[in-house]
Amino acid sequence: MIEAAAHALSALLEPVRFAILVGGVLLGLLLGVIPGLGGVVGLAILIPFTYNLDPYAAFALLLGMAAVTTISDLIPAVLFGVPGSVGAAATVMDGHELAKQGQAGRALGAGYMSALVGGIFGAVLLAIGLPLIRPVVLYMGSSELLAFCIFGLSMVAVLSGRAPLKGLAGVGLGLMLAMIGSGSQSGTPRWTFDSFYLWDHLPLIPLTLGLFAMPELAEMAVSRKSISREENPDFSLRQQWVGARDALQNWWLVLRCSALGSVLGTVPGLGAASIDWIAYGHAVRTEKNPETFGRGDIRGVIAPEASNNAKEGGHLIPTIAFGVPSGASMAVLLSAFLLHGLVPGPEMLTKHLDITFSMIWSLTLAHVIGGLICLGFSGLFARLAVVPAGQLVPIVLCIMFVSAYQGSASWGDIYSAVIFGIIGWLMKIYGWPRPPLMLGFVLGALFERYLFISVEIYGFNWLTRPVVLVILAAAAWVLFSPLKDSLRETVRTFRTFQRGVVRFDGRVAFNLAVIAVVVYALWLSQDWPWDTKLVPQTACYLALIFACLNLLAESFASRDTMAHGAASGHMDTAISLEGPHAALRAWRHFGWIVAFLIVSGTIGLLPGIALLILAQSRLEFGQSWLFSVLATVIVTAALWLVFDRIFSVSWPPSLLGDVYPDLRSMLRII
């Protein structure tokens, strides 16, 4: 093995192959910065270009690109609260808060160092784990995978901060959203409302961008401040190395989350979105002073970034050893194996061991090169945190719309992003944590699939399998303490509230709206077949029970209790619309978005984006005509070049294109 590893390294360091690796790294860093584009898109585009390359160079290009998209997606997550990929959503929670506090450089430095260590850890695990992991992966059946899903869902307790009732209601809502579409057992349409878009389930990208990105942009639009709230934030190299030192000082957390990401990465079906949140929840559950998470705790950046990059090595283990892809990117990578005449399986550990080691070296070198490049430019990126909101909001908003469109390439993606943006905004205002909803959504379909397979194979004896019992015990341990404390606080509220005094405000109204939606969903599902409605109705009752408990708690809570709850900190910090102009600005911001949807549906998405940037920059934020015009031209041209010329995106049809089809065939963008 040592001889094969040495041969693979020497072959990879040959100048041409090394240059190809660096080219893949640079392309991956670019794709990671653009929300919605990631390793899957890059792999799909690059694979045809590897046809004339030898396997060493081909996988250097592909893995060099795929490995570092998880490094650079930290940039939009920290600076704008926009996850560059679904695997960076958990990083938003503390990374963006740090940027608001003028510590963007520190957050980026810590994230890059954690990503570097995590990526190398994943590659090392891949090197030593390939021969050893086979019996473990083969033992993993549907029952164990179902137990992992339940354990992931149990993290809702620690992702909810001091609001576990809202968190458990949120995870129920997330599970409900995951059930939208054709039923996995009978194909019965569930909550599709006769919409073809919803038949194939809600895409993850627009939901993620809506829940996490749009509320942050709305907050900037309302406050009219830059991302950083500090007058003189520190962008020096020293500040970045402070963040890097934070990662090294928390070395035990980095190693634990790297190991967690690597191991979970080997489990087929557990994607980046769920692994990210599980690592974040693990950090909250095991670290001291967990109440600071979600409020700008550097450990909230370190944990998900370490696991997010370590999982890449884990993903490759079942792909190489068994030909079983652990995620979408690995499924695409399998086509590269076939293109180059390689068959995943025992041959990759014997006959083609040198090529396998070249993949390991490619991952390792890509993370080192990508991490060093990002560390070198962190100061430049961090300066975006002081750019005025009036210059950033229109541009980032439009980039987000195009990114959301990558979900399934239909208008429904953009509508979904807007709808969930409004929901996310209301959740943020009223102190409902958004991570639990996201966790329920990403694990919902897996939970349903593995539940029916496990029951079909083992009956209810799947609960007695040893590994399942251990995982379920861990899930119960994670859930027990936060839920016990919350229920005790609710009982105390009932005992101390003033008789006859019942609160009714925005929080209560939002809670009532959640209950109404759940009851309506239950009513719609009553005539579905049993196997189709089992999980959806379970999710509904979960959301309903805890939403009702939360309603009672908030309706009878005194103002002092509510203030204490807000001050004690959630995983998702509530914001206020107090002030003479705040509410009006919020209405105007979402009014601009609605106007954009109308205009874009009439003349086309890209022309609508151009008009939104120009009009919002000039009329809403009062930017100069020179800036407004330049921003419009540059951003529109860049989006057209990247998405139309390079990625050949099929733009959504508009009314103008329907009326004048010849004009559409000539311009393409309408």
Image (cartoon, helix red, strand yellow):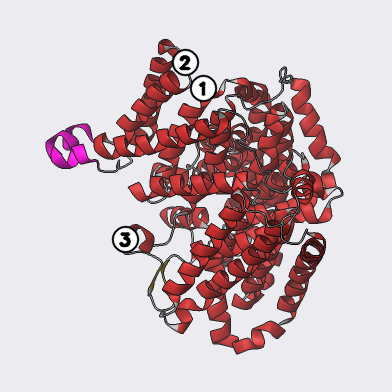
The residue segment tinted magenta is 654-669
- Indicate whether 146 appears above or below 352: below
Crowd rating for badge 3 (residues with CA inside 10 Å; few <14, some 14–19, many 20+)? few
Q: Quadrant of the N terminus?
A: bottom right
Q: SS at mark 2?
A: loop
444, above or below 240, in the image: below
Q: Are marks 1 and 2 in contact (CB under 8 Å)?
A: yes
Q: Amino acid at mark 3?
A: Phe
Task: Nearest to the eye among marks 3 and 2: give it.
Answer: 2
Contact, mark 3 vs mark 1 (Cβ under 8 Å): no
From the viewer's perspective, tell me whether residue 256 is left or right of residue 112: right
Mark toward the start of the polypeptide (3 vs 2): 3
Q: What x and y, as percent, mark residue 73?
A: 58, 39
Numbered circle sitting on residue 623: 2
Asked where in the image residue 635 lies, by quadrant, the reply is top left
Q: Main SS of the magenta segment?
A: helix
The CA span between labels 3 and 1 is 37 Å
Residue 437: within the magenta?
no
Going from the N terminus, do you reach mark 1 or mark 2 first?
A: 1
Within the image, what quadrant is residue 514 found in?
bottom right
Residue 390 has which mark?
1
Q: Residues within 10 Å of mark 2 (few under 14, many from 20)?
A: some
Residue at screen point 55% across, 70% down: 540
| Vertical arrangement, residue 538 with respect to residue 407, above or below | below
Q: According to the image, label 3 marks what residue?
A: 196
What amino acid does circle 2 point to? Gln
